[in-house]
């Protein structure tokens, strides 16, 4: 009976290929099965959907109806929706205003900095804007600085990831986000001295970091962050209780500052002193009043640029800001919420993309979530839609390229021919995107491995990409 079934499947495939049809295959390629088995994974831990985009002959469905956690492939949904609904030229505005008076080169009163959701407002941007205050003839500020975050609803970090709340990738959305609210220490080995130097740029007023850290005899560089044993009892005076493994090259260790206002205050003091602006006040959170007088508005980089950073490097906070901006545009003057943003994306998915309710359950847009769910077939439908979208060039250009850049830079599979957004979270590894096969035909693919040992290997998904590249 098995031989009869196998012969039947072979005949069906042969017929499909001879007729130029896309064969509806619901069994896994041998190389993928072998990769699952050798990795200690069951076939039921994998979900796959593969569909042709331009007349290719492969078509694979394997548990494609099962709801899985998308991890960071959720960013594919967020970014495509934003490119279509906001447009690639969308920019975020940060406003500087004040109450009080400006006389004799002194602003006497309160300086307001109102965030407009710019996800990439960094220290260099702050340096530019404080320099602009100087160019307006303000040499001194006598008063406090108020940060207005009312453009977005306040977000708290997800309790499901509490163990990693000190990691920048868990940062909450913040309408007045500065420098990703992170402090980055560059750790440079000096192996002849058996220690590593520690530097922070810029050197922040109020931040005291170790100048060096010991190096251990541990070979290799596995779990180097854990080996350093970073102590953040006082986040402004971090310490190392461990050592850097001797097998490590230079590393950058970043952590999330817990107090956003304190973080702003450190940077304002530091940058103000650099540009020659005198200020001795404090930073508070509040609302810029309607009667405050505008000094200037500044605009972010465009959405197309931010989307590329979001997907290439899987930046969670950028994705969160992009999603919330959909709600901000839809309801001006009302703090943007995830609930409203999800409703907008769900409507777009159903009415434009043609994906039924419940097949994609978005959460915060980044994929750092235990609640988000997708089916593989819905994701390839999304990719197929994106392939035909006017925003396809910007969207596809944001995907990591196999063996080339982003999160696919070290994946030596179909080098240069697979544009794949990856996802990784505890118990799930996922990938979705477009592969150009050797034949020149292109395919939309989505795959996810879930459960025990799912994150220990790239092999099953890599063998799948390889199979499409070679056989498609």
Image (spheres, helix red, strand yellow):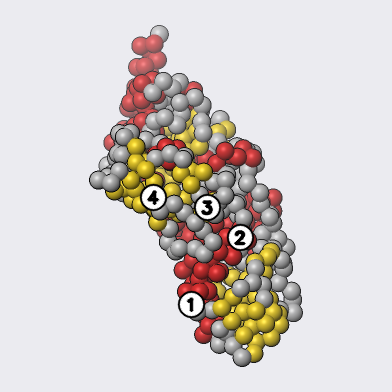
Report how far apart the C-alphas of labels 1 and 2 lie in the structure.
20 Å
Whether residue 432 is visible here, answered yes or no, is: no
The 10 Å Cα crowd at callout 1, few under 14, some 14 to 19, many 20 or more, is some
Q: Which residue is mark 2?
A: 262
Percent x, y of residue 210: 44, 52
| Residue found 61% across the figure and 73% down from its top | 280
Instruction: Name the quadrant containing residue 11.
Output: top left
Front in this rendered view, residue 178 or 145: 145
Determine which of the numbered discs, if any, sits on residue 237 in the image. Answer: 3
Residue farthest left in this picture: 192
Q: Residues within 10 Å of mark 4 (few under 14, many from 20)?
A: some
Q: CA distance from mark 4 to mark 2?
A: 25 Å
Q: Disc 1 or 3, which lies upstream in sequence?
A: 3
Tell me the SS state at disc 3.
loop
Kindly identify the residue that appears in the image at 61 percent across and 60 percent down. 262
Discs 4, 2 touching: Cβ within 8 Å: no
Query: Percent position (x, y) of residue 316?
Result: 53, 50
User: Contact (CB < 8 A) between labels 3 and 4?
Assistant: no
The residue labelled by disc 4 is 212
Residue shown at the point (40%, 8%) measured from the top left: 1
Residue 423 picture location, percent across and down: 47, 41
**What element does badge 1 sit on?**
helix
Q: Is residue 358 left or right of residue 468?
A: right
Residue 426 position, x and y percent, is 51, 33
The quarter of the picture where the C terminus appears is top left
Please tell me which of labels 1 and 2 falls first in the chain: 2
Q: CA distance from mark 1 to mark 3?
A: 25 Å
Q: Is residue 47 above or below residue 397?
A: above
Furthest-top residue in view? 1
Residue placed under numbered mark 1 in the picture = 275
Q: Is residue 60 among what the camera can see?
A: yes
Relative to 16, residue 233 above or below: below
């Amino acid at each position: 009976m098995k031989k009869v079934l196998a012969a039947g499947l072979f005949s069906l495939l042969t017929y499909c290929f001879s007729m130029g049809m896309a064969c509806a295959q619901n069994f896994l390629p041998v190389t993928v099965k072998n990769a699952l088995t050798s990795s200690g994974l069951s076939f039921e831990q994998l979900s796959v959907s593969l569909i042709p985009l331009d007349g290719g002959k492969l078509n694979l469905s394997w548990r494609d109806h099962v709801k899985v956690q998308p991890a960071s492939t959720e960013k594919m949904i967020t970014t495509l929706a934003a490119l279509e609904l906001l447009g690639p030229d969308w920019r975020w505005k940060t406003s500087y205003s004040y109450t009080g008076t400006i006389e004799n080169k002194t602003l006497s009163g309160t300086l307001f900095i109102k965030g407009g959701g710019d996800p990439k407002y960094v220290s260099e941007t702050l340096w530019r804007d404080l320099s602009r205050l100087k160019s307006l003839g303000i040499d001194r500020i006598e008063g406090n600085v108020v940060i207005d975050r009312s453009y977005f609803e306040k977000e708290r970090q997800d309790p499901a990831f509490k163990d990693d709340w000190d990691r920048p990738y868990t940062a909450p959305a913040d309408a007045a986000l500065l420098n990703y609210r992170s402090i980055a220490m560059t750790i440079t080995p000096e192996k002849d001295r058996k220690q590593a130097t520690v530097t922070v740029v810029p050197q922040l007023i109020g931040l005291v970091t170790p100048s060096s850290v010991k190096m251990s005899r541990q070979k290799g560089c596995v779990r180097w962050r854990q080996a350093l044993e970073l102590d953040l009892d006082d986040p402004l005076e971090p310490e190392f209780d461990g050592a850097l493994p001797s097998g490590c090259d230079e590393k950058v260790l970043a952590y999330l500052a817990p107090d956003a206002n304190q973080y702003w205050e450190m940077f304002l003091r530091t940058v103000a002193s650099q540009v020659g602006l005198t200020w001795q006040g404090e930073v508070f959170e509040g609302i810029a009043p309607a009667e405050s007088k505008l000094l200037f508005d500044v605009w972010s980089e465009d959405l197309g640029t931010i989307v590329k950073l979001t997907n290439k490097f899987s930046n969670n906070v950028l994705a969160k800001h992009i999603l919330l901006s959909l709600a901000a545009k839809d309801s001006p003057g009302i703090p943007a919420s995830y609930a409203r943003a999800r409703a907008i994306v769900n409507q777009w998915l159903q009415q434009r993309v043609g994906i039924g309710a419940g097949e994609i359950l978005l959460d915060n847009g980044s994929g750092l979530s235990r609640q988000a769910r997708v089916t593989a077939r819905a994701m390839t439908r999304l990719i197929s839609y994106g392939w035909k979208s006017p925003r396809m060039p910007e969207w596809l250009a944001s995907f990591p390229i196999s063996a080339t850049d982003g999160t696919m830079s070290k994946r030596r599979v179909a080098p240069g021919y697979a544009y794949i957004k990856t996802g990784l979270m505890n118990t799930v590894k996922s990938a979705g995107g477009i592969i150009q096969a050797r034949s020149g035909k292109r395919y939309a693919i989505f795959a996810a491995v879930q459960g025990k040992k799912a994150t220990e290997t790239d092999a099953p998904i890599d063998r799948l990409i390889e199979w499409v590249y070679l056989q498609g």
